[in-house]
Image (spheres, rainbow, N blue to C red):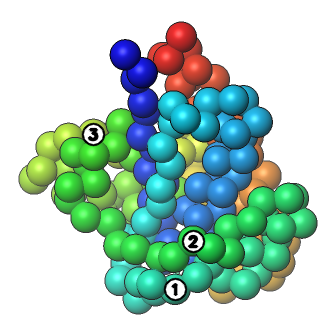
């Protein structure tokens, strides 16, 4: 039996942090040879950007690291996501609060902070939307490191 693991990244708008996490994690998974075992998606708790491509600054920062996220389109988080994904990983405490409210009603996979898989002291991926380009670089640094930790855990689970 080929077991598959499903990972969902969640932020507010689904145009900066979570599509970046989706793209970076997909690149790590592909490099590791586990692309056919791990499904990856992202969404936002807010509705404002549904159907939109990632923020141009996020796409540019990712492209500089060899990751193309330009084909992703924003969608909104829904309660059934908690039934469909094995990992629901949120970027900050506000996302955690919002998704945990839904989890209390719905059950399913309990959301967790994505950076709980990282080694740094940062617990949240800060929202880069209203800041400068360096904010997008910092987002990529944080999610790359946490992505490596997450992949190590999933690799054990699949072994
Ligand atoms: P994200 O960033 O949650 O990382 O996609 C944001 C994008 C848009 C907004 C806020 C955060 N906004 O308020 O429109």
x, y percent for residue 47:
35, 83
> Which residue is identified by label 2?
72
Q: CA distance from mark 3 to mark 1?
A: 27 Å
Q: Front-most of 115 and 148?
A: 148
Tell me the quarter of the image containing the N terminus.
top left
Could you say where residue 92 lies in the image, as x and y percent from the top left?
A: 50, 58
Can residue 34 be spotted in the picture? Answer: yes
Real-space Cα separation, disc 2 to disc 3, in angstroms: 24 Å
Indicate if the residue with disc 1 has its beta carbon within 8 Å of ligand 1. no
- Along the horizontal axis of the image, is 32 left or right of 43? right
Q: Which numbered disc, 2 or 1, marks the residue that appears first in the sequence?
A: 1
**Going from the N terminus, do you reach mark 2 or mark 3 first?**
2
Residue 57 appears left or right of 110: right
Residue projecting furthest to the right: 64
Q: Residue at x 62, y 73 (%)?
A: 71
Label 3 residue SS: loop
Residue 19 tag number? none
Q: Residue at (79%, 52%) from the top-left corner?
A: 141
Q: Where is residue 139, by image quadrant?
A: bottom right
What residue does disc 3 label? 109
Q: State the image coordinates of residue 28 (x, y, percent, origin top left).
A: 72, 40
Q: Are marks 3 and 1 in contact (CB under 8 Å)?
A: no
């Amino acid at each position: 039996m080929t077991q598959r693991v499903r990972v969902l990244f969640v932020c507010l708008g689904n145009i900066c942090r979570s599509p970046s996490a989706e793209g970076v994690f997909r690149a790590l998974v592909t490099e590791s040879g586990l692309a056919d075992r791990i499904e990856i998606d992202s969404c936002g708790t807010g509705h404002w950007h549904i159907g939109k491509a990632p923020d141009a600054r996020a796409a540019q920062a990712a492209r500089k690291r060899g990751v193309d996220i330009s084909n992703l389109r924003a969608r909104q988080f829904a309660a059934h996501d908690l039934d469909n994904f094995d990992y629901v990983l949120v970027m900050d405490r506000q996302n955690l609060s919002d998704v945990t409210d839904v989890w209390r009603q719905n059950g399913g996979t309990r959301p967790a902070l994505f950076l709980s898989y990282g080694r740094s002291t940062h617990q949240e991926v800060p929202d880069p939307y209203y800041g400068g380009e360096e904010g997008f670089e910092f987002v990529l640094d944080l999610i790359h490191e946490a992505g490596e930790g997450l992949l190590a855990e999933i690799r054990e689970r699949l072994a």
